[in-house]
Image (spheres, helix red, strand yellow):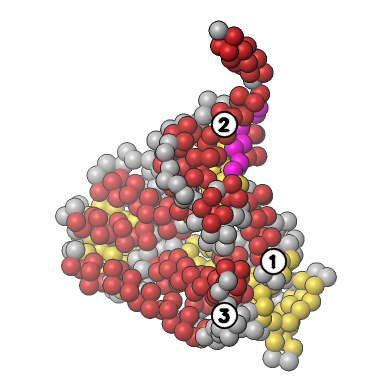
Amino acid sequence: MAVDYDLVVIGGGSGGLVIASAAAQLKAKVALIERDRLGGDCLWFGCVPSKSLIHASRVAYEVKNAAKFGIYTDNYNINFAQAASHVQQVISTIQPHDSPERFESLGVEVIFGDGQFLDNKTFIINGRKLTARAFVIATGSRPAIPNIPGLNQAGFLTNEQVFSIQDCPQSLAIMGGGPIGCELGQAFSRLGSKVTILSSRNQILPKEDPEAAKVVQDQLLSEDIVILNNTKAERIEIENSQKKIIAGNHTFLVDEILVSVGRVPNVESLNLEAAGVTISQSGIKVNDKLQTINPRIYACGDVIGGYQFTHVAGYESVVVLTNALFFPISKVNYRVIPWATFTDPELARVGLTEQQAKEQYGEDVYVLKQPFSGVDRAQAEAKTLGFAKIITKGNGEILGAHLVGASAGELIHEIVLAMSHRLKVSALTGIHIYPTLSEVNSKAALLLKKQQYAANTWQQTLLERFFNWRRSL
């Protein structure tokens, strides 16, 4: 039976945009459906605005602490509205790249509205019935809202509202000690808020290496951010126009609450049951080809759960594109997935943690840890906080890496490249420009040979005898 399109993409966020534009450029007939604005969470409420606000807050922090370099700025002040304007300006500068006009110029038919599946091969929107050889669900996710008595009545912010406020709250409680909570907590603190972070786990950033997470936590504490680990809000009340938070033994008043306790997939309005698509609590169920149970329908990005990062959605979209347009033979491989938390210091990770590596490989695990304090460029810029930790097997195979320190989100890519091409850790010991922060990687990589040599007393004895013999000639 003839169909209207080669591909119908549902969702105009990171994954959907990549698929729609690439498919159209490959001369496929494509429809792109979006209920709100193209660009998705990353452009409007995520990566772009958060990193813009973080940059403004870092400038404020550097100015405040410039005296250690002999530069005095006693009369500086922060205009939060101007910082917020910078955020919106960055969004508006990037937005044309994701505009409907651009995608239409590529040959994509862009359709705005809410739609749903009628059956396993038909999608209806604005009264139109669309059929296609394949469908892609890339509808993303939204903030999870905890069921806390009084929260709705008191009012709160999520990442979908926080970048639009014009006044910096004098006091701010953040529910959630993950990347969003820590990044925005530090940013708002540096821009003038008294910040309290409520973390339900025994450490902030619970998915990270505990040593690395502690470096970030200690820095946040040094900036007078209050961190309440193993703590959840139990009730919210309104008292004297403020929000009163009751959390275990802690009771305190704040002007605003930011909720960042997780994400939920956007699937409710799609009538997936009619399409033969199943979902779990984390998102749409897919196989390693990113097909749902209905092989004509694919899904990628936040809506399937898993690694909820823009760059992962971009990677998944390439797998979906080749499978949906041609033949379903490509499979996802999540062995080397990097990510970063853009606190100051930054924290970046790829691969296994030290504990995970030891559970899988036992005694054949080496931990190569190089402090930033041992890197001359870090000393020159007073950015000595943190370390690089590379985890390898005895043969040099890189199992994972954790960087916490200045520019960690940039420095991790050298290790990502090595892991992607299955290079040994010795590949990282090549010549690095002096003085650069990237020397932290080469110095860490050298530690494998140093550790193995230190443990090899037979080799040490042999070399000692060899040089004694050479001197005697």
At label 3, the amino acid type is: Thr
For the point 60% across and 65% down, the residue is: 182
**Most foreground residue, 82 or 430:** 430
At label 1, the amino acid type is: Ser
At label 2, the amino acid type is: Leu
Q: Earlier in the sequence, mark 3 or mark 2?
A: 3
Element type at mark 2: helix
x then y, percent, for residue 206: 64, 54
Q: Earlier in the sequence, mark 2 or mark 1?
A: 1
Which stretch appears magenta? 361-370
x then y, percent, for residue 384: 59, 55
For the point 64% across and 84% down, the residue is: 170
**Disc number placed over residue 448 in the picture, else none:** 2
Judging by the rendered image, the residue that carries numbered circle 1 is 222
**Disc number placed over residue 73 in the picture, else none:** 3
**Relative side of 143 to 137, left or right:** right
